[in-house]
Structures are given as C-alpha cells and as structure tokens.
Amino acid sequence: MKKALRKIKKALISSGLKSGLCKQIIVSAYILGLKMFTKYKRLENNVYDTIFKFRPEFEGDRAKAKKLFREIMYCRFMYGILPKEYFIYRFDLLSHEGRLTFVTRSNKYEYYRKFNSKNYAEFLNSKTETLRIFGEFYHRDVLCVYDSNDFPAFCEFIEKHPRFIYKPAQDYGGHGIKIYDATHYESAEDLFDIILFNGASVCEELIVQGKEIAQFHPESVNTVRIVTYRSDDGVAHTQWCFLRMGAGDSHTDNMSAGGISALIDFETGIICDCGRDYDGNRYVFHPDTGVQLIGFNVPRWDEVKQMIQKLANALPQVRFVGWDLAYTDNGWVFVEGNARPQCVAPQITAYNGKLHAYKQMDEIFKADSEAKKRG
C-alpha cells in the first residue's frame, strides 16, 4: 500500500499538476486517507495553530484560514513539509519547481539511511559513546554516570566543578539538559540520587566561551555548527556552516528553543548573511544585545577547519554529520555531533533550497561505491 502511494505521489510530482481542480482532488484524497489511517484531527489542529501563529489576522476569517489550510496540506503531501516550513521557507512565493529544491521532512531520511551506518550513527545519539570516541576533542572534564559505583568519581568531579552541566545519555535538540550547582544541595548523595534516577548521563565542566562569541548572547553557549560529508578518501566536504546563538531567556542556542542562526562562509569564517529564527525573522543585529551579525569574523577559523577534518575521520562509518564546536579562550572545543543534522538554517536564508547539496553528496557516495566494486 505504502509503495503504491509513493509511486502515485512521484508521478504527481513529475507531472507538475498545477490546476486548482487537480489540487482540490489531491488534497481531498489526502485528507480522506489521513482520516482512514492516522490521527487526522491532531494534524488538523497543528496546521491551524501554525496558521494563526504566522497569520493571526486569519483567526477572524475562517474562509481564508481554510483556503490556506488546504494549500498547506497540498504542500505537505507533495513536498513533505511541516506546517511551519510552509511559512519559514516562504512556499507561498515559490513555484512547483522552486519548492522541489528544498530539503524537507520527508525527503531527507533516505540520505541519512544511505550515508550513515545505522549502528555507528547510534554512537552519536549516545552522549556516553560520543565521549568515548571523541574524548580527545572535548578539552574539558567530563564524567559518565551509569550506576552507584560512579559515586566516588562524582564526588571528585563536583569538588572541582560544583557548578556543571548535566546531559542525559540519550537525548537531542537540547532536551533534558540542565545546569546543577552542588552547593545548593545538602549533600553530594542527594544530588547524585537525582542524577542517577534519570538514567545514564554525562556531567560536563561548564564551557566558558570566549568573549568574542559570548558577546552575541552571554546567557547561552553559542556554537558553530558545521555539516560535513566524508568521502572514502578521508576528505570532509563542508556542506554549510553557521553560528548558533541563544535569544531571550534561553540557555541553549538551539533554533527549536528560540535561538538564532547565521550562515558562515566556510572559506573565510565570516558571517555572510542575516541571522534567522524558526519564525522566519531576519536579524542584522542580535535582538537582545545589538551586536552586528553580518561581517563578523569568527576567531581562529583555521583551527576550526583542522579540527573538522580530524572529527570526520574519527568515526568514518558515519559520513554525514553536523559538528557543534564552542569557542573558549584556549581555542575551540567539541560539543557534540549529530548524524541527522537539520537543514533549516541554511535554507531559510534567501529561501535557498539545499536538496542539490544532498544530491551532490549522493554522487560522491555512488562514485565511492563503484570504486569499491572495482576493487
């Protein structure tokens, strides 16, 4: 059934049907299918909530809201977008051909599965495994906590770093991350029990970022995200990179938590365009601190380039990775790697779809695969 639907969808996309009647038929059939096989009501509520967030004036005009709802559902079926992506990628301004250039929710996973060995990719989803493989790049004290046997080591750690950052072993997107201060607890045992209760985790010495990067948003550790594809010859091909900054009262720099991202030219290390957030807002200056984004020269950029090549070769079975690095007075340090790096930040700048970059990586992959076959 799913294979048949995929073939139908592929044929519709290839045909480029644009007439209003065709779109109505597609949307009606799609909604009917959702009602039969999934929780349509939840999706419907999500789409309308998104519409009213980005177009609050439509709350009083149900006819316009319904028309936009059907357009978003059409785009969801045809291009695999999330409701918010319709707005932040400005799909209302794009042609069918323009929309097909975007990496979306539905078309990216085939590349993740192809490029990254599933079992090895799981190492990047585990904070404890990540530490084991990339420990030499942390340049700070980190403790893995598994069970009660780790209590003595925990006591030594908090004596040296009473204020530290806690990360669940299995998590992503900044979820579950907390900053603890051991001096706020009656005993080390009390704090250890809290940490142990939530399962395996890592406790890290807080990163003290250099003032050059901290100036954008001092309350968060602002990181550089560099997405690379490693070919079989050991070269890390950079796809895109950007500076991620917190905003408001957020202590993380994730865009999903309200953060801002600004594209960096990899060759020069200079921010080359406006900052953007998930709501599609553009920033020449950081909205909280007023520091200018465009034209900022990221410090010690040559060090970043060297570090990225080493990181990409530390786990060669995972070719496509988003690397997060933080800047300190002593240089750059590794924060984490993501085997499914999001493509929102590079695409919301100038509404520039990046699916061509994925296809270019696929060509490298195919060439490497053919070379292996030839021996």
Image (cartoon, rainbow, N blue to C red):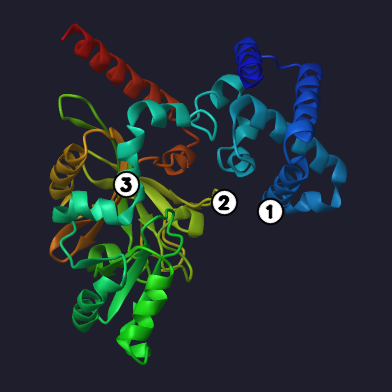
Q: Position of residue 71 (x, y in %)?
A: 73, 32
Q: Residue at x 87, y 41 (%)?
A: 63
Q: Residue at x 48, y 71 (%)?
A: 249
| Residue type marked 1 | Lys
Depth check: 229 or 72 in front? 229
Which comes before the other along the chain, label 1 or label 3?
A: 1
On the question of residue 353 being in view, the answer is no
State the image coordinates of residue 298 (x, y, percent, origin top left): 23, 53
Residue 139 appears in which quarter of the rendering? bottom left
Residue under circle 3?
Answer: 124
Task: Work out whether mark 2 precedes mark 1 in sequence or the reverse, and give the earlier one.
Answer: 1
Taking the spot 74% from the left edge, 33% from the top edge, the residue there is 37
Q: Tell me the residue that label 2 is attached to.
A: 279
Q: Residue 15, how many percent across, how many down?
A: 64, 10
Q: Which mark is residue 66?
A: none
Q: Position of residue 178 (x, y in %)?
A: 40, 70
| Residue 302 appears anywhere in the view | yes
**Residue type highlighted by circle 2:** Asp
Q: Are marks 2 and 1 in contact (CB under 8 Å)?
A: yes
Q: CA distance from mark 3 to mark 2?
A: 28 Å
Label 2 SS: loop
Label 1 CA crowd tier, 10 Å (few <14, some 14–19, many 20+):
some
Count up the numbered dots. 3
Out of 142 and 301, give the one closest to the viewer.
142
Relative placement, left or right, of 186 versus 72 is left
Residue lying at 17% horizontally and 37% vertically, measured from the top left: 313
Classed neighbour count for the residue bearing mark 3: other residues with Cα under 10 Å, few (<14), some (14–19), many (≥20): many
Secondary structure under tag 1 reads helix
Q: CA distance from mark 2 to mark 1?
A: 9 Å
Q: Which residue is mark 1?
A: 53
